Amino acid sequence: MVPARQTLSVPHLGGINVGYRLSSTPPNQSKPTLILIIPFTTTVDYYLPEFENRELTDKLNLLAIEPLGHGATRTKSETFTYWDSAIMSLQLMDALGIEKAFALGTSQGGWISARMALLAPQKVGKIRYPCSCDLIP
């Protein structure tokens, strides 16, 4: 069964409720984590096939994130950038207890993934754009 979309608050921009889907709660610390950043105008349902793929979920924790302006992600701030979505995503990692991850972005998700790696290279080990699943160990 595919886990439902959830929300969690992080402090950036005075508070953001982040929409996300996590393949296992809490994340299995013995498996690597792959963060999936959605493309423009979609929700975490974009990655539903990946969450339904047991071959992937047996080997990886999957974390799909809805950037600012998408899905269930909400903030009181009237303006935001891809940098803000990257900071928000890093704060979500912290809130979920994910110390290190790979990041994969589709379309705008690639820009956000790259910003995550630039902001926190110790937390985001590798990025992929466009979508690629060759990170499976």
Image (cartoon, rainbow, N blue to C red):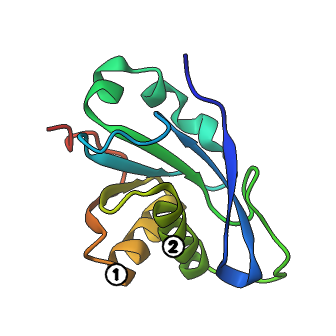
According to the image, label 2 marks what residue? 86
Q: Amino acid at mark 1?
A: Leu
Give the image quarter of residue 129: bottom left
Quarter holding the N terminus is top right
Q: Amino acid at mark 2?
A: Ala
According to the image, label 1 marks what residue? 118
Where is 64 relative to 124, above or below?
A: above
Name the residue located 52 percent from the left edge and 46 percent from the top edge. Answer: 64
Q: Is residue 84 left or right of residue 103?
A: right
Local crowd size for mark 2, using a 10 Å CA cut-off: few (<14), some (14–19), many (≥20): many
Q: Which SS class for mark 2?
A: helix
Question: Can the viewer see residue 92 in this picture?
Answer: yes
Circle nearer the N terminus (1, 2): 2
Residue 68 position in % (x across, y down) = 69, 66
Quarter holding the C terminus is top left
Q: Is residue 130 left or right of residue 32?
A: right
Q: Closest to the observer: 77 or 10?
A: 10
Give the image quarter of residue 66: bottom right
Question: Can the viewer see residue 80 in this picture?
Answer: no
Name the residue located 33 percent from the left edge and 47 percent from the top edge. Answer: 33
Residue 87 position in % (x across, y down) = 53, 77
Where is 109 relative to 6, above or below?
A: below
